[in-house]
């Protein structure tokens, strides 16, 4: 009985791992705080360069 239980447990765990790989998460990828600051800075510089200069 113990041998059957161990074999079934091993097979079930392999099935669980295989199924977990198939289902992808809808959660967005983690972006570190430093990367967020860099993205904000680049977005700010792009935004300021895209604005038309009205000197007239």
Image: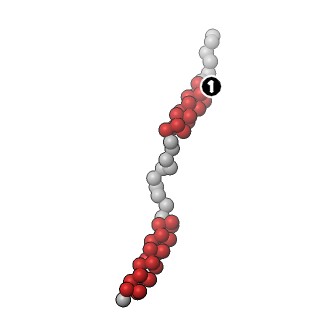
Image point (62%, 21%), residue name: 52
What element does badge 1 sit on? Answer: helix
How busy is the neighbourhood of tag 1: few (under 14 within 10 Å), some, or many (20 plus)?
few
- Quarter of the image with the C terminus is top right
Height in image: 45 above or below 33?
above
Q: Report the residue at 50% width, 42% height from top.
A: 32
Q: Which residue is the extreme one toward the bottom? A: 1
> What residue did someone put label 1 on?
49
Name the spot of residue 6 as percent of width and height, x first.
Answer: 41, 81
Dividing the picture into quadrants, the one containing residue 7 is: bottom left
Q: Residue at x 44, y 74 (%)?
A: 13
Q: Does any portion of residue 44 appear in the rendered image?
A: yes
Residue 45 placement: quadrant: top right
Res. 43 visible in picture: no
> In front: 28, or 1?
1
Report the residue that reaches farthest toward the front. Answer: 2
Tell me: 23 left or right of 38: left
Residue 38 is situated, as x and y percent measured from the top left of the image, at: 56, 34
- Decide which of 28, 8 is in the foreground and name it: 8
């Amino acid at each position: 009985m113990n041998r059957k239980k161990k074999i079934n447990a091993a097979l079930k765990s392999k099935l669980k791992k295989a199924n977990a790989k198939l289902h992808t998460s809808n959660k967005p990828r983690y972006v570190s705080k430093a990367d967020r600051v860099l993205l904000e800075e680049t977005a700010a510089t792009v935004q300021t360069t895209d604005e038309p200069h009205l000197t007239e």
